[in-house]
Image (spheres, helix red, strand yellow):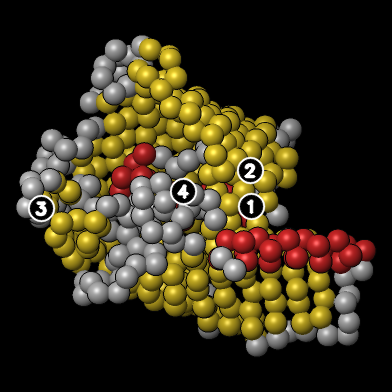
Amino acid sequence: MPLIPRALVLLSLALVMAVPAAAQTELDERAQIEVQDGITIRKDSVFLLNLRFRMQNRFGLTSVAGDDLEVATVDARVRRLRLRLDGYVLRDRLRYYIQLNFSHSDLDLDAGGVAKPIRDAMVYYHVNERFYFGFGQSKLPGNRQRVVSSGNLQFPERSIANGAYTLDRDFGLFTYWTLPVGPQQVQVKAALSTGDGRSATPGNSGLSYTGRVEWLPMGAFANSGDYSEGDLEMEPKPKLAIGVSAHHNDRAHRTGGQLGAELYAHRSFSTLIADWVLKYRGWALSGEFFERRSDDPITTDAAGDVRFVRTGQGANIQLSRYWRSRYELAMRYSLVHPAADTRMYDRATEDLWLGATRYLNGHRIKLQGYVGYRYRDGTLWPDHAGNAWTAMVQVEFGI
């Protein structure tokens, strides 16, 4: 049976099992099924499986130009459809996390690539409450918006700065350490990985090195809100998180390291990221800054075609207000500014977005919409080549 139908059958069976479980959670003396935060199957203290799914269905329109509102493209599709399994085996210190994807975009088929159904496949060992490490495929500790789950975003998509300069999933060894300093908190994260992205074919001898430090001077956020966009927890006191990531990819073979088309020759590059988020009484303000450098970002083939590492700078700023009525308004400004040596192939781009969200069950079930304006080369006027309007609505549904 093909992979996707098999996974959907598994999901269907799990949902069927959940119906009787709602009325009677105890199946026998050894195992239980609970329906609360997903569908949980538990056996004493030696096994736990938590099953969740989510989907994002969207409809969007993009104009021909800034001064021509005729529709150029229609984006109507299932953007994301994912199945997540996590829990522990033998003891709660030995944990696992698996995430599979099934939509066309999630499988990396939009650009004609090979289907990649595995997003995450991790085994973790928790040494204690403050330190744990993992082995497998997962998100590198890069910019905050990338690490935030796509289900916890304020807008249907991440920023263009994230798209140009982010770090992505990779296979390797990951470590996480949390250090309380009085009421403050310091988090140190590191990863040694292949640098080639998820489900990569073995062969490249270069590796990727990533480190990140986060400082929470006012203590931890409610419900891990530093990694969830918007202040849905209505923080009663100001909460701030500041993070810095440094990344070096040695002999990368893709334009974005873990992402992008294959280069015609290996190239090394470094990425520096700084980000922060502030939340207080329904207000949320966040920002990110990127800088990527490479000594020799351009590669060519025998025919003279060019592929290059996306070097340059990027920035993203978001401001939002959430009300107890479960409505939210959000604004975003994003910038991608290519470096001088790649500017002839990569145009400077800026985005202005205004979005609204109606939360029905937190980030799990929500209706999102936004209107955006993208302009090129720093020219805001609608008649400039490449400028365009976008409007989109998206429904998020999951457990």
**Residue at mark 3 to residue at mark 4: CA–CA distance:** 28 Å
Residue 75 placement, left or right of 324: left
Please state, as top left, top right, bottom left or bottom right, where the N terminus lies in the image: bottom right
Quickly name the residue at label 3.
Answer: 301
**Mark 3 closeness class: few <14, some 14–19, many ≥20 residues within 10 Å:** few
Q: Secondary structure at mark 3?
A: loop
Mark yes or no: residue 389 visible: no
- Mark carried by residue 304: none
- The circle on residue 105 is 4
**Of the image marks 2 and 3, the number of the one nearer the N terminus:** 3
What amino acid type is highlighted by mark number 1? Arg
C-alpha distance separating marks 2 and 1: 7 Å
Residue 306 pos. (x, y %): 13, 46
Left or right: where does residue 35 sit relative to residue 335? right
- The residue singled out by tag 1 in the image is 54
- Residue at the (56%, 70%) spot, across then down: 97
Quarter of the image for residue 161 reads: top left
Q: From the viewer's perspective, is residue 91 above or below residue 394?
A: below
